[in-house]
Image (cartoon, rainbow, N blue to C red):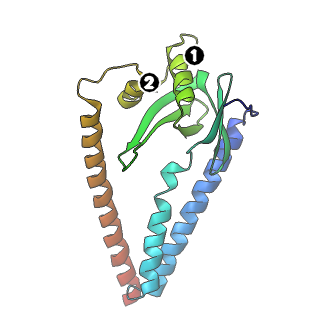
Amino acid sequence: MTQTLEPVPPTVARRGARLLFWFVLLVVAAMTTTAGVLGASSGLAITLIIFGWVIAQFVPFLPWAFRPVLTGTDLTAWTVSGRRTVDLRRLAKVGRMWFPGNPQSVDTLVLLDTNGVRLIVDDAEVDDAVFESITDPECAEPRVAAGAGHRLGLIKLPIDDRVIRGFGAVLLAVLYFGLTLVAIISAATVIEMIAGQ
């Protein structure tokens, strides 16, 4: 990360994130409404519901950082909604997002500063800068999740990290697929009710 980028004002970053979020929500709502109008027996209705569900799964990943650049204590990166800058001196929360995968899992830091700007980053240089920010007494004292603290070397977990992540992944998968099943059944019920009128 040798290049430099101008910091993006927080209002601009938040506006871009909000616009993209509402656009995705509008697209999913339009697809679901169209599916309801078409009726439950329509193959296109089921396709629209599934496609809308797939699009909705990307909402948590909107702040994913591409090409992060550190300029002093400002971390600027490209996201789907444009560039964002997180002020590492003013971190409010530091979390960790981990998903098991084959051949490689996703293991990232989720950074939120006091301006409300969020970035999801996987970069060793950023990890070092976040560690320095957290341990610097002149910087804001963020809430650090146990997993993020472990990744940064701030804490040692009492149980092997793989056990915790494995249990968390199983629990997350059960909740995720359970809620997805409830959402699909609910959508199908609403479509049948609309089609029956």
* Horizontal arrangement in the rendering, residue 58 relative to residue 77 (left or right): left
Which image quarter: residue 193? Answer: bottom left
Q: Position of residue 49 (x, y in %)?
A: 44, 74
Quick check: 170 above or below 26? above
* Horizontal arrangement in the rendering, residue 39 relative to residue 3 (left or right): left
Q: How far apart are marks 1 and 2 (CA)?
A: 17 Å
The answer to whether the residues at label 1 and label 2 have Cβ atoms under 8 Å apart is no
Identify the residue shown where x is 41% and y is 28%: 151
Q: Position of residue 137 (x, y in %)?
A: 53, 10
Identify the element where label 2 is drawn: helix
Quick check: 49 above or below 75? below
Quick check: 58 above or below 165? below
* Horizontal arrangement in the rendering, residue 3 relative to residue 98 (left or right): right
Q: Position of residue 114 (x, y in %)?
A: 58, 29
For the N terminus, which image quadrant?
A: top right
Q: Pick out the residue farthest to the right.
A: 6
The amino acid marked with disc number 2 is: Leu
* Horizontal arrangement in the rendering, residue 12 relative to residue 29 (left or right): right
The reply to whether residue 72 is visible in this rendering is yes
For the C terminus, which image quadrant?
A: bottom left
Q: Pick out the residue farthest to the front.
A: 103
**Residue position marked by numbered label 2 in the rendering:** 152
Work out whether residue 20 or residue 33 is closer to the camera in this orientation and state it. 20
Identify the residue shown where x is 45% and y is 82%: 45
**Residue position marked by numbered label 1 in the rendering:** 139
Quick check: 89 above or below 101? above
Q: Position of residue 173 (x, y in %)?
A: 30, 53
The amino acid marked with disc number 1 is: Cys
Image depth: mark 1 or mark 2 in front: 2
Identify the residue shown where x is 28% and y is 60%: 178
Other-residue count near label 2 (Cα within 10 Å), few / some / many at <14 / 14–19 / ≥20? some
Which image quarter: residue 19? Answer: bottom right
